[in-house]
Amino acid sequence: SLNLPILKRKWDIIDLNFISRYITTNKDRQKIIRLYLHGYSVKDICSNLNFKEGKVYKTIRDYEKGYNKHE
């Protein structure tokens, strides 16, 4: 009865398909670790997933040190 369009406009601008950086990083990390455990070299992982070597080396190093709480 009040015809308040304010809420409709406010909620229409929210992107429902947004994926946070945390989620994408976690998915990338899982892909890297899976390939590493299957015996792929760092260069093969970089070429398959299109990542830089630094990211792959850091992920593998953190995994081997035991920083794999998020899996």
Image: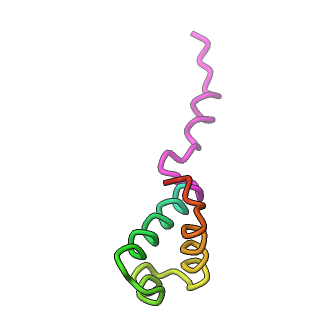
State the quadrant of the N terminus.
top right
Residue that lies at the very extreme toward the left in this rendered image: 38
Which of 45/8 is in front? 45
Q: Give the residue at x 57% y 30%.
A: 8
Residue that lies at the very extreme toward the front in this rendered image: 65
Q: Give the residue at x 47% y 82%.
A: 50
Tell whether 10 sits left or right of 19: right
Magenta stretch holds residue 6: yes
Percent across and percent down for residue 5 are: 60, 26
Percent across and percent down for residue 12 are: 55, 39
Which of 21/69 is in front? 69
Q: Give the residue at x 46% y 90%.
A: 43
Indicate whether 61 appears above or below 21. Answer: below
Tell whether 67 sits left or right of 44: right
Residue that lies at the very extreme toward the bottom in this rendered image: 43
Q: Which residues are magenta?
A: 1-22
Residue that lies at the very extreme toward the top in this rendered image: 1
Indicate whether 35 appears above or below 1. Answer: below
Q: How many marks?
A: 0
Q: Give the residue at x 55% y 63%.
A: 25
Indicate whether 9 appears above or below 16. Answer: above
**How did the renderer colour the structure?**
rainbow
Quadrant for residue 63, please give it: bottom right
Percent across and percent down for residue 53 are: 56, 85
